[in-house]
Amino acid sequence: MSKPLKPNLASIVAAANPVRPVQTAEIVQLDTGAAPAAKPATTLKARARQMSVYLEPPVYDQLRDLAYAERTKMHALMLEALDLLFKQRGARSIDGLTKPDGR
């Protein structure tokens, strides 16, 4: 007499889950008539590129103190400094660069 076959995982799973006929569904594409408009990035974080600036502690402290005294952000002061640099070098201002027709 031969030995009974040992069950394996595939046969156990097949016995537990009988094969069911696969139901197919028809996929329908709706024609809206126009392509969806791409939304422009609305936040500065989505539009801009990040850049790190390493400042010596006294420079950082002075910038922070100026921002506090003027009740503004350090970021605004950095942009003001860049605008002054662009003006000194004869380049376009930040406003001129960020206008839609600025390119």
Image (spheres, helix red, strand yellow):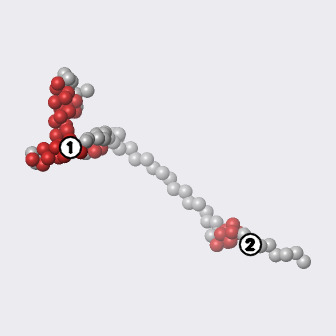
Is residue 45 rendered to the left or right of residue 7? left
Residue 2 spot, x, y in % from top left: 88, 75
Indicate the amino acid at tag 2: Pro
Question: Mark 2: which secondary structure?
Answer: loop
Residue 56 spot, x, y in % from top left: 25, 42
Residue of label 2: 7
Residue of label 1: 58
Question: Mark 1: which secondary structure?
Answer: helix
What residue do we see at 20% from left, 33% from top?
82
97 to 53, vertically: above or below: above
What residue do we see at 26% from left, 41% from top?
55
Q: Residue furthest right?
A: 1
Front label number (1 vs 2): 1
Residue 34 spot, x, y in % from top left: 33, 39
What residue do we see at 9% from left, 45% from top?
70
* Residue 88 appears anywhere in the view: yes
* Residue 75 appears anywhere in the view: no
Q: Nearer the viewer, residue 5 or 31?
A: 5
Q: Residue furthest top?
A: 90
Indicate the amino acid at tag 1: Pro
86 to 13, vertically: above or below: above
Q: CA distance from mark 1 to mark 2?
A: 75 Å
**Residue 22 location, quadrant:** bottom right
Quarter that holds the C terminus? top left
30 to 98, vertically: above or below: below
